[in-house]
């Protein structure tokens, strides 16, 4: 499962930050997930929550960011929640992702 390895990455970053800050606990973490990333927010949340330790008592906020596609045919850019769509202007299916594939750790609160 894709989300498990992503969760493992986030956890190792969180651990690193925690030890860098000499912190005891990660109070909050705020993530932004692009809607074209293929990440299931529910699954990611579950994977993070079942992480045995670091993020177990952490308030986890996951925000979905809208994705943006560009049509390679006519150049128009438009927002879309998935990749399987046609250009709204010329109805072609030659699209590239402008934003929406990323996962960003927006903030962490360490105590
Ligand atoms: Zn187009």
Image (cartoon, grey):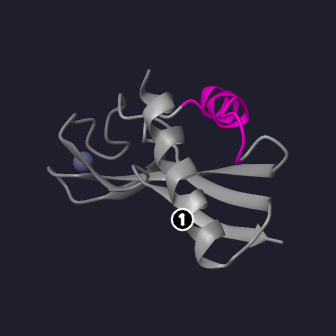
Q: Seen in the image, is 22 located left or right of residue 74?
A: right
Q: Is residue 25 above or below residue 72?
A: below
Image quarter for residue 44?
top right
How packed mark 1 is, by other alpha carbons closer than 10 Å (few <14, some 14-19, many 20 or more), is few
Residue at figure coordinates x 36%, y 34% from the top left: 83
The percent coordinates of residue 22 (x first, y second) are: 69, 76
The percent coordinates of residue 20 (x first, y second) are: 58, 76
Verify whether residue 46 appears in magenta.
yes
Verify whether residue 30 appears in magenta.
no
Residue at figure coordinates x 22%, y 34% from the top left: 93
Residue at figure coordinates x 73%, y 34% from the top left: 49
Name the one closer to the observer, 42 or 47. 47
Q: Secondary structure at mark 1?
A: helix
Q: Which residue is mark 1?
A: 16
- The region drawn magenta spans 40-54
Q: Seen in the image, is 53 located left or right of residue 89?
A: right
Total label count? 1
- Is the residue indicated by label 1 positioned so its CB lies within 8 Å of ligand 1? no
Q: Is residue 51 above or below residue 22?
A: above
Residue at figure coordinates x 67%, y 70% from the top left: 107
Quarter in which the C terminus is drawn:
bottom right
The percent coordinates of residue 103 (x first, y second) are: 48, 53
Q: Main secondary structure of the magenta part?
A: helix
Query: Residue most toward the top?
Result: 1
Name the one closer to the observer, 51 or 99. 51
Q: Is residue 98 above or below residue 46?
A: below
Q: Is residue 34 above or below residue 6?
A: below
Q: Is residue 66 visible?
A: no
């Amino acid at each position: 499962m894709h989300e498990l390895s992503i969760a493992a990455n986030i956890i190792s970053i969180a651990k690193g930050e925690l030890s860098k800050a000499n912190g005891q606990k990660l109070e909050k973490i705020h993530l932004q997930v692009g809607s074209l990333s293929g990440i299931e927010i529910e699954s990611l949340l579950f994977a993070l929550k079942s992480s045995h330790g670091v993020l177990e008592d952490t308030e986890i906020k996951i925000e979905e960011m809208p994705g943006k596609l560009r049509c390679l045919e006519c150049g128009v850019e438009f927002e879309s929640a998935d990749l399987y769509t046609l250009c709204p202007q010329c109805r072609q299916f030659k699209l590239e992702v402008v934003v929406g594939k990323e996962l960003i750790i927006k903030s962490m609160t360490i105590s």
